[in-house]
Amino acid sequence: GENVEQHPSTLSVQEGDSAVIKCTYSDSASNYFPWYKQELGKGPQLIIDIRSNVGEKKDQRIAVTLNKTAKHFSLHITETQPEDSAVYFCAASNIQGAQKLVFGQGTRLTINP
Amino acid sequence: KAGVTQTPRYLIKTRGQQVTLSCSPISGHRSVSWYQQTPGQGLQFLFEYFSETQRNKGNFPGRFSGRQFSNSRSEMNVSTLELGDSALYLCASRQGGLEELFFGSGTQLSVL
């Protein structure tokens, strides 16, 4: 089955700097790669996603890149703000039929003012 | 539009008991999935229901079961609770044909 590895497990950056979180996946059949942000006491919230037919996607300060050959994808957050502090999860799935997301272990991002 | 609603928010049970968790999806969403979140194992898929039918199931023992009603509301049941079942149980819904999952805030289950 699919296995998703996520690094680093914790990340601390200065406000205004960039943050990068990386994930690798094992199943070449996976074709959908979402990123979720989870704040304390809340469920995960989708912040950006990418399909395997796209190499990069950007939404304001957030971008995701995908390298299908190497089976890895990354989340880039620029101009970080205190409200970006949260736990971030990458995930992978095959969107054919029922959806079963396989999540990475999560990255606790702390933005220092 | 109301989000995904899970009840109760917190539960405390003892070993050997059973528990039922409830989830109301976003209006119009016919797919409901359940995930278990623990510090050690992270987020793990339990099962997905669509139009009252289970479409996919994760690698959990048969003590974990679920069902979906005609109004798309879903319940999951855990029988013969074990200490290791202590976790945050998250329900998520999505609109048919779209990938985005909308998660509820979860039910925090503690097994003593």
Image: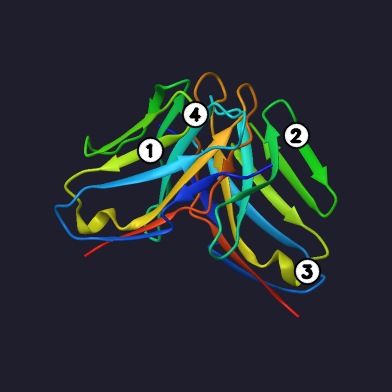
Asked if residue B21 lies left or right of residue A17, the reply is left
Residue B36 at what x, y percent from top left? 39, 48
Q: Mark 1 = which residue?
A: B75
Q: Amino acid at mark 4?
A: Ser
Residue A27 seen in the figure? no
Subunit bearing disc 4: B
Q: Where does residue B38 sit, x and y in percent of width and height?
A: 39, 57
Residue visible at 50% across and 45% down in the picture? A103
CA distance for labels 4 and 2:
35 Å
Distance from the alpha carbon under mark 2 to that under mark 1: 38 Å
Residues tagged 1 and 3 counted as in contact (Cβ below 8 A): no
What's the distance in space between the residues labelled 1 and 3, CA to CA? 38 Å
Query: Label 2 amino acid?
Result: Gly
Examine the image and state in which quarter residue A61 appears.
bottom right
Of labels 2 and 1, the one closer to you: 1
Residue B16 is marked as none
User: The N terminus of chain B lies in which quarter of the figure?
Assistant: top right
Please report, as a chain letter, where disc 1 is located. Answer: B
Instruction: Using residue A22 as the reference point, say whether residue B7 is left or right of it.
Output: left
Distance between the alpha carbons at the discs numbered 3 and 4 = 38 Å
